[in-house]
Amino acid sequence: MSFALTLDPVLGHGLAASLALILLPGALHKLRDPALFQAAMEQYGLLPARWVPAAAWTLSLLELAAGLCLLPWPTRAVGALLALLVLSVASTAVAMAWQQGRRRIDCGCGAGVGLRLSPGLLWRNAVLLACALLTLLPLSARPVGWPDGLATCAVTLFSMGLYAVVNQLLANQPRLQELRNAP
């Protein structure tokens, strides 16, 4: 008897849609204002200045491709692999910059709330990486009906709300720390 790990279709589709709705706005933010994203990448201090523009464009386009490929079922695995690549590169850069003492810089992720580098950002990205890994699992073969579509929407909305709350908490954390340290 063999055991194959599968994912319920509601969870699989919900995770893929959530990742797409996280990656697509981030990519579009970076592509709309490439100078801002390049400036954020320069603050990391991990690449020679002449490589930053090409790296910024490449990362932005990979993020866009990941988000677009996650939505249709036939390209979901490609989207998940691209998401894993983008999130791994970004998380590695955050960890390296943090280790080098660059802690008061914006992450550049396009979340729209001014996130600074932090261990919390790495934990958030670890959860996103886990979600991308889960979307690579095959879906169970159970019949799917319209209630599953509603449940998928609910999973996606819940995930997006949770993502927004976590980002806001991460953005507020430095300010709260400053208030705690104030006389």
Image (spheres, rainbow, N blue to C red):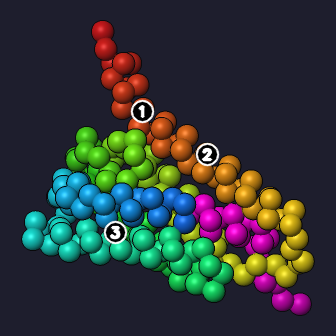
Residue furthest out toward the bottom: 1
Q: Nearer the viewer, mark 1 or mark 3?
A: 3
Could you tell me which secondary element the residue under label 2 belongs to?
helix
Quadrant of residue 177 within the rendered picture: top left
Q: CA distance from mark 2 to mark 1?
A: 18 Å
Where residue 113 sits: x, y (%)?
40, 41
Q: Which of disc 3 and disc 2 is earlier in sequence?
A: 3
Span of residues in magenta: 1-19
Quadrant of residue 35 within the rendered picture: bottom left
Q: Is residue 27 magenta?
A: no
Quadrant assignment for the N terminus: bottom right
Q: CA distance from mark 1 to mark 3?
A: 27 Å
Where residue 146 sits: x, y (%)?
86, 67
Which label sits on residue 52? none
Per the image, the residue denoted by label 1 is 173
Where residue 178 sits: x, y (%)?
33, 23
Per the image, the residue denoted by label 2 is 161
Could you tell me which secondary element the residue under label 3 belongs to?
helix
Residue 84 visible to the viewer: no
Residue occupying the point 51% across, 59% down: 22
